[in-house]
Image (cartoon, rainbow, N blue to C red):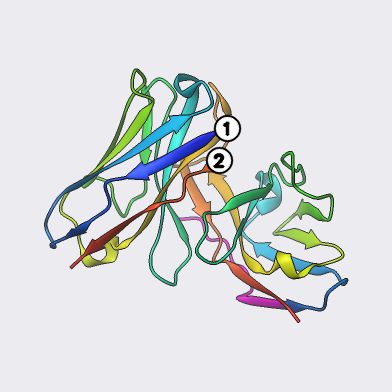
Amino acid sequence: SYVLTQPPSVSVAPGQTASISCGGNKIGSKSVHWYQQKPGQAPVLVVYDDSDRPSGIPERFSGSNSENTATLTISRVEAGDEADYYCQVWHSSDHRYVFGTGTKVTVL
Amino acid sequence: QVQLVESGGAVVQPGGSLKLSCVASGFTFSNYGIHWVRQAPGKGLEWVAFIRYDGSDKYYADSVKDRFSISRDNSKNTVYLQMNSLRGDDTAVFYCARDGGPYFYYYYMDVWGEGTTVAVS
């Protein structure tokens, strides 16, 4: 089965940039999607197809994907960005949807 | 507005069965595939199942295959998840989520419900 590995936690000061990695074998050949989940709430899509943003998501959220690592970048971090973030891909060989292990972003 | 509302969560004994429902509103339900995703207490997200917009294709995670069954009734804007032979590790919040676009596979989930809780004990 396909495995996506994320760092358990990332800490960042307000106004700085947070980078969250998502590692997977040849993940650069797949489309990566990112979700934000605040405590007690449902996930929210923040980036899809590596780097596209749904309407209503601030430009501060951006994504990239290459070789074995995809990255979600949050620029000018705000207190409201504190949440868990999950990457996700579709594994074509068995039509399964795979989520990463999740990263807790803490705003200092 | 676009909305998904889950229901049917309950406390059930191991080996028991439960049927979850997901009712959609605010969009043309019959054009969209729907996923079920679950989250065990304190854990990450786990994809459970997907049904295509017309019900013609269904896919399951290995952990639930042969125990869970996904279906839909487009006349009622509703997707169901029939869960049989429930185990303790099925305890989770179950979310339904819309696939990213109509008709074709988009491989991500763009709208989520608030979830319904299943406890197997």
Q: Which of the 4 quarters of the picture holds residue A82?
A: bottom right
Between B58 and A40, which is closer to the camera in this rendering? A40
Q: In the image, what residue occupies the spot 62% across and 59% down? A: A24
Between A86 and B59, which is closer to the camera in this rendering? A86
Helix, strand or loop for disc 1 = loop
Helix, strand or loop for disc 2 = strand
Q: Earlier in the sequence, mark 2 or mark 1?
A: 1
Q: Residue A20: percent from the left, percent from the top?
A: 72, 66
Question: Which quarter of the image is occupied by the N terminus of chain A?
Answer: bottom left
Q: Which residue is mark 2?
A: B111
Q: Residue B19: percent from the left, percent from the top?
A: 22, 43
Question: Which quarter of the image is occupied by the C terminus of chain A?
Answer: bottom right
Q: Residue B97: percent from the left, percent from the top?
A: 48, 41
From which residue to which does the magenta span run?
Answer: A1-10
Q: Three-letter amino acid code at disc 2?
A: Val
Instruction: Report how far apart the C-alphas of labels 2 and 1 lie in the structure.
Output: 11 Å
Q: Chain of mark 2?
A: B
Q: Which residue is mark 1?
A: B1
